[in-house]
Amino acid sequence: MELRLSKVGHSYAGREVLRGIDLEVPQGQIVCIVGPSGCGKSTLLRMMGGLEVPAQGDVLQVGYPPEGCLNPLTFIFQDFALLPWRSVAGNVSLVLEDHPIGRAERREMVADVLARTRLTEFADALPRQLSGGMKQRVAIARALVVRPAVMLMDEPLSALDSQTRELLMDDLVNLWIRQPFTAVYVTHNLAEAVRLGHRIFVLSRRPGELREVIQLDKPLAERGYGDAELEVQQKHLWDLMRAEAAAADAELVGG
Amino acid sequence: MRSLLVDKLAQKVAFRGGGFTFQSRRWVGFLVFVVLLLLAEWGTRSGVISPLTLPRPTDVFQTFVELYSSGLLFQHLIPSLLRLLVGAALGASLGIAVGLLIGLFSFVRAGLLPLVAAIFPIPKIALLPLFVIWFGIDEGSKYALIAFGTFTPTVVATFAAVDNVDRTLIRMGQSFGLSWVSIVRKIVLPGAMPGILAGLRISLAIAIILLVAAEMLGAEFGIGAYILEAGSLYDLERLFAGVVILSVLGVLVSAVIGAVERRLLDWRT
Ligand SMILES: Nc1ncnc2c1ncn2[C@@H]1O[C@H](COP(=O)(O)OP(=O)(O)OP(=O)(O)O)[C@@H](O)[C@H]1O
Ligand SMILES: [Mg+2]
């Protein structure tokens, strides 16, 4: 299943936030969206996930979700969005409970996904007992368990410290290598974008328009921390964004 | 050179981070009780406090023991507890239900919120004669008064608690395609539970206050009736024995809610 956006535009209370976005999310690839603060990245992602309706243009889902997919468009949130009153296993199991799955099979699915995200020994822990990185791993496990067609991630690592961020990026890369998934990854962090993205869409400041599309052909498995080739790409991205970011920063909020 | 510096100039950084944290110190509350009682006992014995202003604690205790041994205690206590239980259960469960509806549906909110605001400030005791006409002089009017009194604060606490549930969690539920019922049952209700229980603490205390008021009219037995009778006879010992029973009841109710909180809200730090 692929996602296709055509001429998507949106305004909040007469203020244009997005304008004429054409974008494609090919199957089995990670698409990164970068852009200055307030340019409408989160809005765009919410539209892709059906949590908001664009004022102009269409968000299309092309083809059918794969067999056994329980929730085709699945979010991973910046602030984890875990239920504090449920254990790790309970949080994962929550999203299966509305589907006609037997109790035993559900437990098996939860156990399997916790093993894949290396959380097995924390299955009974409550969210408040976990570090930020662990919480996000639980959220990733919860997203994986519904076998999504497209994962929609809104700055999933930006609430974490930089070491944890590196570790979790490795986790995501490994998960992808073992079983390629389709994802849209919104981020502020250009290092994340060049590390995880097969394709990077650069948005301008508000109203967000597509500035440039960068294709990265180096396989994810071969990209590493401090990769010189990636640094060049990252520098190029920063040059693109620098002026926009500065201008966006100088704008009055709500102006 | 270094040790010289340490000797001459080094000072421990003074600690100034104390206070403002909650620590469990149960015995302090108990101690305050005991000290107050001892003061009253000493005051009444030595004549500093005249027996007309305050009964002697030991006399009150004596009265209480008599009440117990004569079997009258349970004759008063059981009907009161029943009224409290039925009235508060009715009022609190209706209040939680209506509060949830107000919190969940904007139509219900627009329709009922002004009504709730209008009946909240009415002193429910003033409506007792009306309840007697509506529900009869017997138990009906007493249940109604207590239920009505617990209803409004519970409604307000519940819908405020629902409003305070983290919206990102609800969004998360929607993004995973959870049904409306699941979102309410598994996200909204547990998320609102701390606020609902905090509201119940207040509502149940109000229920105890209203119990006495409810027993003002046409009650032969009941703690409230006992207190009112003692009051009209200026029998301070019995008055205080009754008041102590109410206080104990209040402490018990609060302890029960505390236990429920510890069980249901153990996920909080
Ligand atoms: N529900 C809303 N109602 C009104 N305005 C909104 C709403 N959501 C977002 N906006 C505005 O739309 C603009 C784009 O918001 P959005 O959150 O999509 O930006 P973003 O690119 O994700 O920003 P950031 O990088 O800070 O996360 C902002 O100016 C924001 O104030
Ligand atoms: Mg955002």
Image (cartoon, coloured by chain):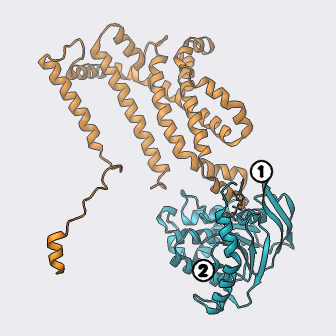
Chain colours: A cyan, B orange
> The N terminus of chain B lies in which quarter of the figure?
bottom left
Q: Hey, which quadrant is residue B73 in on the image? A: top left
Q: What element carries label 1?
A: loop
Q: Which of marks 2 and 1 is nearer the N terminus?
A: 1
Q: Residue at x 48, y 33 (%)?
A: B202
Q: What residue type is labelled 2?
A: Met
Disc 2 packing (10 Å; few <14; some 14–19; many ≥20): some
Say which residue label 1 marks. A13
Q: In this view, does A28 lie to the left or right of B226?
A: right
Chain of the residue displaying label 1: A
Q: Residue at x 56, y 80 (%)?
A: A166
Chain of the residue displaying label 2: A
Q: In which quarter of the image is ligand 2?
A: bottom right
Relative image position of residue B42 (x, y in whole percent)? 15, 24
Relative image position of residue B245 (x, y in whole percent)? 35, 25
Residue furthest to the top in view is B233
Say which residue label 2 marks. A169
Circles 2 and 1, Cβ within 8 Å, touching? The answer is no
